[in-house]
Amino acid sequence: MPSEESDDRHVLRILISTDNHLGFQEKDPVRGNDSFAAFEEVLIAAKNKGVDMVLLGGDVFHDNKPSRATLHNTFKLLRTYSLGPEPVRIQSLSRLPAVVAGERGLNYEDPNFSVGLPIFSIHGNHDDPTRDGGSSEALSALDLLSTTNFVNYFGKHDKVDDVCVQPLLLRKGSTKIALYGIGNIRDERLNRMWVNQKVKFVRPTEEEGRDSYINILVLHQNRAEGRGRKNAIYESMIPGWFDVVIWGHEHESIPSFQESLHGQFRILQPGSTVATSLVTGEAQPKHFCLLEVHGEQFRMQNFPLRNVRGFRADELRLDDEDFGLDAEDARIETRIEEVLEERVETLAEEAFRSYEEANSDSPFPPNRLFRIHQPQLVLVRLKVDRQGFSTINSQRFGARFVDRIANPSDILLFHQRRKSAQDRSAGQGGGRRSQARGALSQPIAPDELDEIQVTDLVAQELMAADRKLRLLKEEDLKNALESYVQKQQTSAIADLVQDCLKETQRQMGSSARPAAASSRGVPAATEVATERGRRSSSEVEVLSDVEEPIRAVAPPPQKSARRGRQAAASQPASRPAAKKRGRTGGGTQSRLPTSLDRDSDVEEIDVAAEDADDLFDEDDEIEDQPSPPPRAKRPRASALPKTKKQSQLATTSSTSSSTASASRGRAMPNWGGSGASKPSSRKPRSATGGGSSHAADDWA
């Protein structure tokens, strides 16, 4: 690579750090400042080395909703180290609204701000965008940093079933890079989209000099090693034309380039800057990296973090012959505590010694904002295989290390390995001691992963045939539970239930409306009235020929009596309507469906039935059926003397009642022309229910 002195105008320097987890253990009086102290060291190194930009690979914050104290400390750091009068020597060649979140573009191009150190970042699984309070826009904690012009937030994709990744094109002199970002997406979903070629990358055109760019991809996902087939991203999924892939989310620091077996690109995994879990991978030294690009060449350097609390992790087997422990010993618990205490003391001394060696010539300024509280208190994790022995009280054991270890309550992690077939046979032949010695001569099977998530257990439980959910989907409930537990989104489950309820009501309403409209169109008379003038008597026969009868629904007496008087007044004296047509209002009402129980519906059918009667001309030959004699009136319990006016009213009422009874007694006309009449009813109609890397080579 050309010398920096002669080609500094064309060398683009990028400081890379991932998984800073600002705010981790912020309420711990000992470890509360650890994440901020490590992040401040990264920013100080960026200033001292004169880099052109800082690139963060996700999980800037530890919590999805950072506390006020965390935001206050973060703003203080970014204001101190990112703002300044230093000139920015990189130029943007992209159409920014489609790449960078927000409407202002890059922060150093804003004339109202003086940015001396541009910082670019994607989101991770800890600070991914979420919707709060029914908001239509998903926002991340990084949106706050973008709005305040501290960070250039990119790699945010709103679509959950189709991802189109557009690059951020940057140039310094003759050096050009195309920076692609994919913020964290659920691994199962992203894996499925990649398999279905729903992940597309937009490349510069030939006119823009596609081959002159160094292509860099930043993502925050699980790597395929050691995980399920669909719960990670494989190297083979990444297009081969990339040059560098920066992999976030994995906390183990691998500060050197790894050659890909499926492409020409190199993988860089810087790891986290603070230990968030007490595992062996976190106990490795922490690093940040410096990537230098000149033309079509690039190189990488790694630098160890010094402002990090000392941490040592180890494993121990109680059935080791060197300890000489006997499970039948009466003082076995005391002997176990002595063995474990000796090993923990050794680990604590090693951890503090490594911290002192790393900070012997510390380059930090004396006025730095954050320091590690009580650095002599280190982190220790001892994984104990208790095969053949009982456990001890971890809380009581850790109490003796309160003044020497930062995590006294969880120093020990007991587990028990699985027994092999030979171990079981040896155990049947002898005592526990012989069983333990027999196990030493056999290969040790690798232990299972200790990390078991609650969401996985819930999903596994709901996948049983007798426990499947009917309204909620198992995957949606798993995602809501994960948001509730990990992101502290208290309304996640309630929002899921409300969304499911609204969707169910919408589907039921869309299917009920056609059915209700069909049920109101059941009576043959209504069908005839709707299609007035277009149907013949043969069509009416088809409408009346249905499978099941419909019971009669009596109309309200007030409206029926009023309509009867109106019908009698409108008929000429020489042609009685009831006798000519063979039916009255009562006959029409006997054909109403049982589902119509409202007065408005009954009145609507009555009007439709009267309109249907007009279809019959006076020359229609309708056979009148003999009506049965009127029903005798029930005698009253007591006959009181009536006045002359009351007698006239009673006589009029009796005559009307007899006429109505005779009308109800007539049979329905035979519309088919032969045989007995068929009941007219219709069943309601049933409601009808109604990535590939080379997919896009030009700008969208």
Image (cartoon, rainbow, N blue to C red):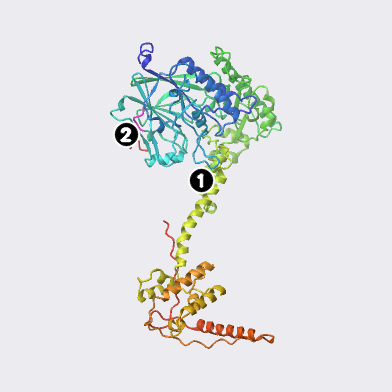
- Point out the residue furthest to the front here: 645
Asked if residue 526 can be seen in this view, the reply is: yes
The spot of residue 484 in percent (x, y) is 57, 40
Tell me the magenta residue range.
239-243
Q: In which quarter of the image is the C terminus?
A: top left
Q: Is residue 514 left or right of residue 482?
A: left
The residue lying at 40 percent from left, 79 percent from top is 671
Q: Which amino acid does label 1 sit on?
A: Asp
Q: Is mark 1 on a helix, strand or loop?
A: helix
The spot of residue 494 in percent (x, y) is 57, 46
Foreground of the two, 218 or 545: 545
Q: What element carries label 2?
A: loop
Which residue is labeled 2 in the image? 698
The spot of residue 142 in percent (x, y) is 50, 30
Label 1: how many residues lie within 10 Å, few (<14), some (14-19) or many (20+)? Answer: some
| Structural distance between the alpha carbons of marks 1 and 2 | 36 Å
Label 2: how many residues lie within 10 Å, few (<14), some (14-19) or many (20+)? Answer: few
Which residue is labeled 1 in the image? 476
Foreground of the two, 498 or 309: 498
With respect to residue 624, does 679 lie above or below? above
Asked if the stretch drawn in magenta spans residue 68, the answer is no
Quadrant in the rendering for residue 366: top right
